[in-house]
Image (cartoon, rainbow, N blue to C red):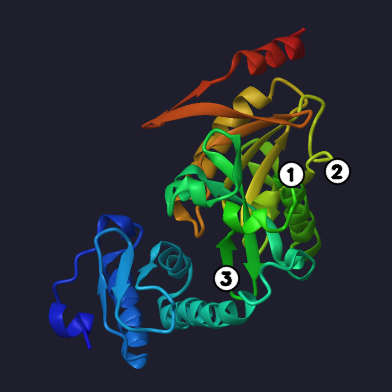
Amino acid sequence: MFSFFKRQKDTIVVPKWASFFSEAEYRDFIKAIDKFFYKKNISYEIGDDASIKVGPNDFGLNILGLTNVSQLCRQDERRNYYELISGHFDAMIRANQFDKDFNKIIDDYETIEKYLATRIYPLDYLEYGGEENKIYSMIAGEIAQVLVFDLPDAIKTITPERAAKWNKTYDELFEKGIENVRKKYPCSISREKIGEFEVLLAQGDHFFAPNIIFDLDKQHLVGNWGAIIGVPHRHAAIIYPIETLAVVNAVTSIVPIVDNMSKQGPGTVNNNLIWYKDGVFEQLRYKIEGNNIEIYPSEKFLEVLNNMAE
């Protein structure tokens, strides 16, 4: 069995993908990884791209990702790293065992519809495993909604081939997925100060907090001119209802917050900002250069700003 510390000794270097760790934090993270796989008697090798190649195991996979679990550890205390890592990977083992029974009923729509969910993902997630193997639609910019199974210990994408056996339209499946998430995963909504501006912060300890964007009107989270939204990661969404031209300065305060939250994760979605109004989502482009933030509003958004100025 391969053990990282038997080979690497004191030569640990923090890789680029884990740059949010200090050297000491990364060392403790790797020690916890090593301890977990040593106890499971599973050989492994960490790659340069936040992946880990594993030998014979009960995961049902031979390549695992480290991005989310590393971000999770970074936001906790170092003494808890092993508990977080073992919880993360043990859940994958349980999910693989659940799959064996779930696959026996997967073609029976009435039985499996309770597991349907619509989840918000970044564009690069679509490329993982191939866009053709996912049911999705773009929301705005580089943010998409994807149809998935929300299983007890895992979230799995649903292929077009699988959905074809249910005789349902994609719109029907997305709506069912949104409905299931709405019932199962409520968000807490609080008012928070960002500089001199107040925003609404939707949070949840589940993976579906960004789904609040499907209920903006229903929960009265928009202003007369819509709302500016950020969905930095799976546990949060930031909403700024637009009522006045103060939105111009508010956006420059919101941008660095959303950008930083997306980098920290876990479960990064995107650092995009979205403008929502009357059921339509539109990306609000920006660029950060040093301490300078440049906003690139669309013609439609500029028209709204002009209307507010009149």
Q: Nearer the viewer, residue 90 or 174?
A: 174
The secondary element bearing badge 1 is classed as helix
Q: Quadrant of residue 106?
A: bottom right
| Residue type for callout 2 | Lys
| Residue type for callout 1 | Asp
Answer above or below: position of 60 versus 141: below
| Residue 46 position within the rendered picture, expressed as x and y whole percent measured from the top left | 26, 70
Residue 76's tag is none
Asked if the residue under mark 1 is in contact with the one under mark 2, i.e. CB atoms within 8 Å, the reply is: no
Q: CA distance from mark 3 to mark 2?
A: 29 Å
Q: Residue at x 70, y 20 (%)?
A: 245
Q: CA distance from mark 1 to mark 3?
A: 23 Å
Residue occupied by mark 2? 218
Kindly report which numbered mark, 1 or 3, lies closer to the viewer in this rendering.
1
Residue occupied by mark 1? 171
* Image quarter (top left, top right, bottom left or bottom right) of the N terminus: bottom left
Categorize mark 2 by other alpha carbons within 10 Å: few (<14), some (14-19), many (20+): few
- Disc nearer the start of the sequence (3/2): 3
Categorize mark 3 by other alpha carbons within 10 Å: few (<14), some (14-19), many (20+): some
Taking 278 as reference, is 205 left or right? left
Residue occupied by mark 3? 154
Q: Nearer the viewer, residue 47 or 151?
A: 151
- Disc nearer the start of the sequence (2/1): 1
| Residue type for callout 3 | Ala
Q: Nearer the viewer, residue 188 or 284?
A: 284
Q: Residue at x 30, y 64 (%)?
A: 22
